[in-house]
Image (cartoon, rainbow, N blue to C red):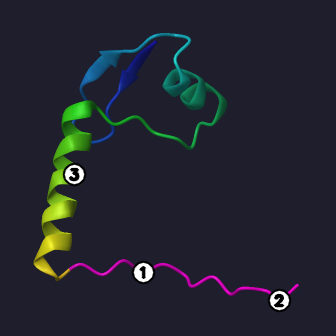
Amino acid sequence: MRVKCVICDTVENIEDYSPTAKKLRNRPIHTYMCKSCHERISKRTNERIASGNFKLYRSKKEEDDW
């Protein structure tokens, strides 16, 4: 299966029956990101977390007594 990275527009081949290919075929909202872009983004995110200027806004889960 040929896929295109959403960030750098490189075209790569992945196996037709891999879990990633299945996810892309069955759920069109999922997008593909190449390994180099994924590593670069995760590295930069970890640097921002370590600097202390990074806030992760997650909704707080309310526990139900039931």
Q: Is residue 53 magenta?
A: no
Please give the count of numbered marks on the rendered protein.
Answer: 3
Query: Is the residue 24 above or below the residue 55 in the image?
Result: above
Asked if the residue at tag 3 contacts the one at tag 2, i.e. Cβ–Cβ closer than 8 Å, the answer is no
Expressed as whole percent of the image width and height from the top left, the position of residue 35 reads 25, 32
* Residues shaded magenta: 54-66
* Tag of residue 65: 2
Q: Amino acid at mark 1?
A: Tyr
Going 59% across and 37% down the picture, which residue do you hit? 28
Within-10-Å neighbours for mark 2: few <14, some 14–19, many 20+: few
Q: Amino acid at mark 2?
A: Asp
**Viewer-closest of 65 and 16:** 65
Marks 1 and 2, how far apart at CA: 25 Å
Mark 3 — residue?
41
Q: Earlier in the sequence, mark 3 or mark 1?
A: 3
SS type, badge 2: loop
Q: Earlier in the sequence, mark 1 or mark 2?
A: 1
| Left or right: 44 in relation to 17 | left
Mark 1 — residue?
57
